[in-house]
Image (cartoon, grey):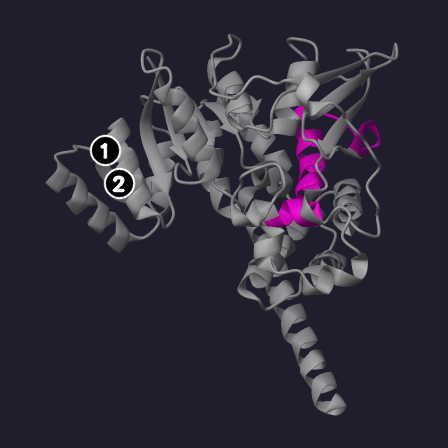
Amino acid sequence: MHGVAILGSTGSVGRNTLDVIARHPDRFRAVALSAHRQIDVLFEQCLAHRPDLAAVVDADAAQRLRDRLVEAGVPTQVMSGPDGLEAVAIHDRAQSVMAAIVGAAGLRPTLAAAEAGKRILLANKEALVMAGVVFMDAVRRGGATLLPIDSEHNAVFQSLPRGYGGDLAASGVRRILLTASGGPFRTLPLERFAAVTPEQACAHPNWVMGRKISVDSATMMNKGLEVIEAHWLFNAPPSAIEVVIHPQSVVHSMVEYVDGSVIAQLGNPDMRTPIAHALAYPERVESGAAPLQLAAVAALSFEAPDPARFPCVGLAFRALEQGGAAPVALNAANEVAVARFLEGALTFDRIPALVEAVVARTPTTAVHDLDAVLEVDAGARRAAAAWLEKNNAVRVAAARAGA
């Protein structure tokens, strides 16, 4: 029985992972789960899957979950805080760890899984965006195996030669083509971006995702972060990575070879496909995703991203080329910007402006350990807060002057 720990089991990726596991009860078992706030959902997951361990961030919430599980006769151990998340990540009965905690919060437990030599199913792109050097060092040091879960990177992984060793040229690869849907605002007039609401930004046309990643898809920052992730996963220089908008979300990404061949991975937009691929790799198992009917799709279209509409893609490329602290600041500033947008405190069109300003103000420094990463992250968040305070003051002053 293959034990699976899930960091972020109540999110979209976590729920889909449990769905795939439930389809193969003779093969996989969820042995440890973690959640942030959705205690009711985690309770139901514990009832259904009977994990050995469950962890939540808050101690009071952990006690409530513990009491409910005891009353229900479920012997799952409950832990809280960073120690609880790390315990999930290094659980001794987990061969694989699904790293699906969104944002910087998932960095520490995912590093712990790497250092413990786990097979990491990586859905938390921030681990590589923030701490590429640190994380890849931990993977090598711990003897961990790294399998990508993002549909784009999983598609690239499937399209590269089996046993790819990290050398594009030696494998005959010219470039990696990351596809992007273009999100809900691919054709929205630019002058309407300032009026975009959180509900509109979270209404992705193809994928069902959490709110943060849905906003990232709408700004295409998610694709910028995926460019940085692809650099670390496949040892690909920025010049060998290209972003292509593909509205149908059927071609999940492609690899172009020097002989002119382009190999693509296709499928319906369903996260259970890459999850099942990574869970069973190198074998294949049924995922629950509907079969792709190409005749029904009828047409596949592609276009270059408009830099005026999606400046976040260019910001990410520049941060990758700059290296060091720049990607850390990019991610931190974006997390702050998206959170404030979802709260109604920042307009959608100002998200790239905040990110660009924070990255520009971040000193160019190397980050060789976790403490350095977290220091840059904290500084970027302070800079983002200061930018917001200053710009809000300017807007208030302008409004008063106009009145």
- State the SS at label 1: helix
Check disc 1 and report the residue beneath it: 47
Furthest residue toward right = 259
Residue that carries the numbered disc 2 in the rendered image: 43
Residue pictured at 21% horizontal, 36% vertical: 77
- Dividing the image into 4 quarters, which one contains the C terminus? bottom right
Q: Residue 61 has which mark?
A: none
185 lies left or right of 143: right
Q: Nearer the viewer, residue 263 or 362?
A: 263
**Camera-side residue: 245 or 390?**
245
Q: Position of residue 131 (x, y in %)?
A: 60, 40
Comparing 49 with 98, the one in front is 49
Asked whether residue 354 is in view, the answer is no
* Relative to 64, residue 208 above or below: above
Write the residue at 76% across / 89% down: 402
Q: Main secondary structure of the magenta part?
A: helix
* Percent x, y of residue 139: 54, 26
Q: Quadrant of the N terminus?
A: top left
Residue range (magenta): 215-243
The kind of residue tagged 2 is Phe
Residue 303, above or below 363: above
The amino acid beneath tag 1 is Leu
Under circle 2, the secondary element is helix
Residue 225 part of the magenta segment: yes
The image position of residue 308, as x and y in percent, is 84, 52
Can residue 365 be seen from the camera position used here? Answer: yes
How crowded is the residue under tag 1: few (<14 C-alpha within 10 Å), some, or many (20+)? Answer: some
Q: Is residue 313 above or below residue 299?
A: below
Residue 296 position (above or below residue 303): above
Does the residue at mark 2 contact the one at mark 1 (Cβ under 8 Å)?
yes
Q: Locate residue 158: give its quadrant.
A: top right
